[in-house]
Image: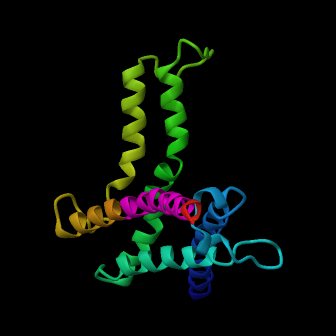
Amino acid sequence: MYIFAVVQAIFMMAQLAVLLDASSRVFAGDVADKYMPKWLTGKKDKTGRPVHSYTLTCGLALFLLLLTGTLPNINSIYNWLLNINGIISPYKTCWVFFAFVMLRMHQDKFHSDYVFIKNKTGALIFTFICATLGFIPQEAEATFGSAAFNHQLIMNIITVIVLFGLGFLLPWLRKREEKREMNM
């Protein structure tokens, strides 16, 4: 049992590291020069990967760890880190939802033999509900209306806002760099 627990803990930590690292590498990949500040993409290793994308990975991991420091015990921390993927994933793939919404908005141009929800408004509401349900804390001790529930709900909202904010901030910083370079 203890061996399984140790192996499972290592697996979960590795999975978190790989998910963060993979997303930051993709983010700092081929089109990064257009959307990311030069200090994140400038220095590259032997294989051509941006070295400073690890700075972004470390920053994201530090942000998550600092948030977990506000939880009462190790079980809450572990469960919150497991559940955060279910919160982030629907919004990380928000462009899939956006594409679905755009297809539904222009369903007269794009024909489909099968339509899950025929009512356009109902389909949009269903999409929003599916993406948003992940915000609700899922721990047994976090019953609706309790301090633990409210605390985790606030943490979930802050996490999504910060990650989306970062997604808007980095391209904005890159545009400022480009303007500064053009003015020189």
Where residue 106 sits in the image (x, y, percent)?
A: 51, 19
Is 83 rendered above or below residue 59? above
**Residue at the farthest right position:** 46
Specify the color scheme.
Answer: rainbow
Count of numbered tags: 0
Q: Nearer the viewer, residue 174 or 4?
A: 174
Q: Does residue 111 appear anywhere in the picture?
A: yes
Question: Which quadrant of the figure has residue 166?
Answer: bottom left
- Residue at 54 percent of width and 48 percent of height: 93
Quadrant assignment for the C terminus = bottom right
In the displayed structure, does residue 159 sit left or right of residue 49?
Answer: left
Lateral position of residue 6 relative to residue 168, left or right? right
What kind of secondary structure does the magenta stretch mostly adopt?
helix
Q: Residue at x 49, y 77 (%)?
A: 59
- Which is nearer the eye, 142 or 97? 97
- Look at the image and tell me whether residue 11 can be seen: no
- Residue farthest toward the front in the current orientation of the protein: 184
Q: Is residue 177 magenta?
A: yes
For the N terminus, the image quarter is bottom right
User: Which image quadrant is residue 6 in?
Assistant: bottom right
Identify which residue is drawn at 56% across, 82% down: 5
The percent coordinates of residue 134 (x first, y second) are 39, 52
Task: Give the percent coordinates (x, y) of residue 99.
Answer: 54, 34
The foreground one among 141 and 179 is 179
Specify whether residue 45 is painted magenta. no
> What residue is at 29 percent from the left and 80 percent from the top?
70
Spot occupied by residue 58 in the image (x, y as percentages of width and height)? 54, 79
Magenta range:
159-180
